[in-house]
Each structure stands twice: as structure tokens, then as C-alpha cells.
Image: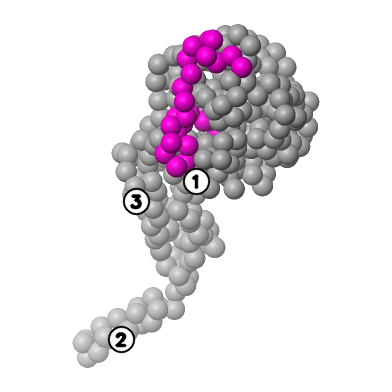
Amino acid sequence: MLFALLASVLSACQKEEATKINPAISWENPADIFYGTLLDTLQLNATADVVGTFEYTPAANTKLNEGTNQELKVIFTPNDATVYNSASKTVIINVLPASLSTAIFNPDVTYGSVTDIDGNRYKTITIGTQTWMAENLRTTKYRNGDAIPEVSGNTAWIGLSTDAYCNYENSTDEIRIATMGRLYNWFAVTDSRNIAPEGWHVATDAEWSTLTSFLGNETNAGGKLKEKGNTHWNSPNNGATNASGFTALPSGRREYNTGLFINDGYDGFWWTSSAYNPDYSWYRYLHYDVSAIYRANFHKQYGFSVRCVKD
């Protein structure tokens, strides 16, 4: 009799358990992060189709080690445990090596990454319908592995009609190069061997216009593109919010007619891949004391920064 009663109770419990509903948990693999990034709601953002609580392993504010295919797990406990079962889900995240860059990125947006032929890894950011590098290009090779000539001497730089790159003031400081990128003349930018990583290209004049239009217009977009504060931009860095995550920096330029370096900390200049005429090409520039971005054209022999956009 007792055995029959216990069997009946067990059967009832099993039946009750079987009739409970399994909640649906939605959680995609998070975007890659760089070492040193603490886990937060950008990665730990699972949702369920019923009300309940989420317990993550590892927890928020954890700093993961470098490495790919690391597991993040969540256990979901529904508020109504009489109707719903608990549930769990696991996703995968990649933690990339920390960058040497001292740029101040926007902590409120999600960055991706892309790697060039030299092995340099760049943060990327989706703005509207476009995905841009959030850092200046610093490759020393074309996509096929051919070297881009480095031209350090002022006299050698003047009047070049062939491809070249340089570092501002010929610096060898790895942190500065990682932060500010390198400067290229327009012939390197448009070389058929392709200066951009696979699946990317140097932005055209039209693509820059699409970017600034999405951010309002040229009068207002500059502030949304510029890195905040005065770590790299000279004061007052008017209008700078970096709301877009683009993190534009004042890398200066190299003069076409003297080979001298100027405007570091005051201005950023970026080539487009679009020619204006046989001697001039379109570019964009940002200034430290205005919130606008300017569209202009100038000699192809200048040394400017480069940003790439995804194909």
C-alpha cells in the first residue's frame, strides 16, 4: 500500500514536471573584445520570453584572459516556477590581444575587429549602413604582401608621384604608431595592389558623404566623429562626443612641397580614394576648435591618414 502511494506521488510529480513550459532564451555570440575589457551588458545581454532572473558565468566585471572560443553561460530562473522550468544557454566569445593604442574609444558602443596583412588588429564600428575602421591604418604592406616604400627624408618626399608612407616625424614609437597610425600619399592609397585588408577598401568621397549625412551634416558630424577630451586633441576640442564610435584623432599631416610634418594635435586629415583632377584628390579633415568636418581637395603628394570601410 505504501509503495503504491509513493509510486502515485512520484508519478504525479513527474507529470507536473512534464507539463511545465521551457522558456525560450535568446542570446547571440557577442562581438570580439580586446583583452582588458570587463564583461558588461554589451556581452551579458540574454533575454527570455518570460519574466525571471539571469545568472551569468563568468559574472559582470570579469576580465577574461586572451583567447578564442571562450564560453559564457547563463542560467535563467523564471519567477513563476510552477509553470516554467529553469533554462540555460552558452555562447562563445573571442578575447583579442590588447592594443598598444592609447585612443579613448566610446565605451557605449560595440566594436568589431579586422586584421591587416601586417597582423595589425583594428577596432571597427558600424555607423548607419556602413562599417568603418575605428582606427587609422598602419600597414606597411599591400594586401598581396608587397612592401609600401617608407620615405623618411624630406627631399625624397617632395614631389613624389609614386607610392609611399611615413610615420609622423619619422617616429619609431610603437605606442604612437598604434594610436595615430601612419601617413600615406595618395598613390599608395590607390595602388592596384590594395592597401586595405581583404574585404575592405579605402573610403571614397561618396562614402564619406554618406557617413557625414547619417550623422546630421558636415556642420555637426565632426564632433560625433572626434575622440572626446584632450588626451590627444588640443583644447578646446569643440563639440567632441565620439557618439559614433569613430574615434577620429589629430594625426597631423606631411607637407607635399617641404616634406615637413605639421598640425599634430590640432588636425586630422583623411584621404578618400576619389580623385578631384589629375593633381588633386578629395579628403576630409577635422580641427581642434570646431565641431564641423570639412570636405576639400589637395595635392596627391600630401601625407594623410587613411580609414577603410567594409566592402
Judge depth for marks 2 and 1 and give the one in front.
Answer: 1
Q: Nearer the viewer, residue 150 or 65?
A: 150
**SS category of the residue bearing label 2:** helix
Q: Which residues are magenta?
A: 133-159
Q: Nearer the viewer, residue 281 or 45?
A: 281
What's the amino acid at mark 3? Asn
Q: Position of residue 81 (x, y in %)?
A: 44, 65
Q: Nearer the viewer, residue 184 or 294?
A: 184
Q: Quadrant of residue 99?
A: top left
Q: Quadrant of the N terminus?
A: bottom left
Q: CA distance from mark 3 to mark 2?
A: 47 Å
Q: Which residue is mark 3?
A: 69
**SS category of the residue bearing label 1:** loop
* Residue 140 sits inside the magenta stretch: yes
**SS category of the residue bearing label 3:** strand
Residue 86 seen in this snapshot: yes
Q: CA distance from mark 2 to mark 1?
A: 66 Å
Q: Is residue 187 above or below residue 131?
A: above
Q: Which residue is mark 2?
A: 8
Q: Residue at x 64, y 44 (%)?
A: 130
Q: Residue at x 54, y 63 (%)?
A: 49
Q: Position of residue 75 (x, y in %)?
A: 39, 56
- Give whichever of discs 3 and 2 has the lower sequence position: 2
Q: Nearer the viewer, residue 13 or 2?
A: 13
Q: CA distance from mark 3 to mark 1?
A: 23 Å
- Callout 3 crowding tier (Cα within 10 Å): few <14, some 14–19, many ≥20: few
Q: Is residue 255 above or below residue 37?
A: above
Q: Is residue 129 left or right of residue 100?
A: right
- Callout 1 crowding tier (Cα within 10 Å): few <14, some 14–19, many ≥20: some
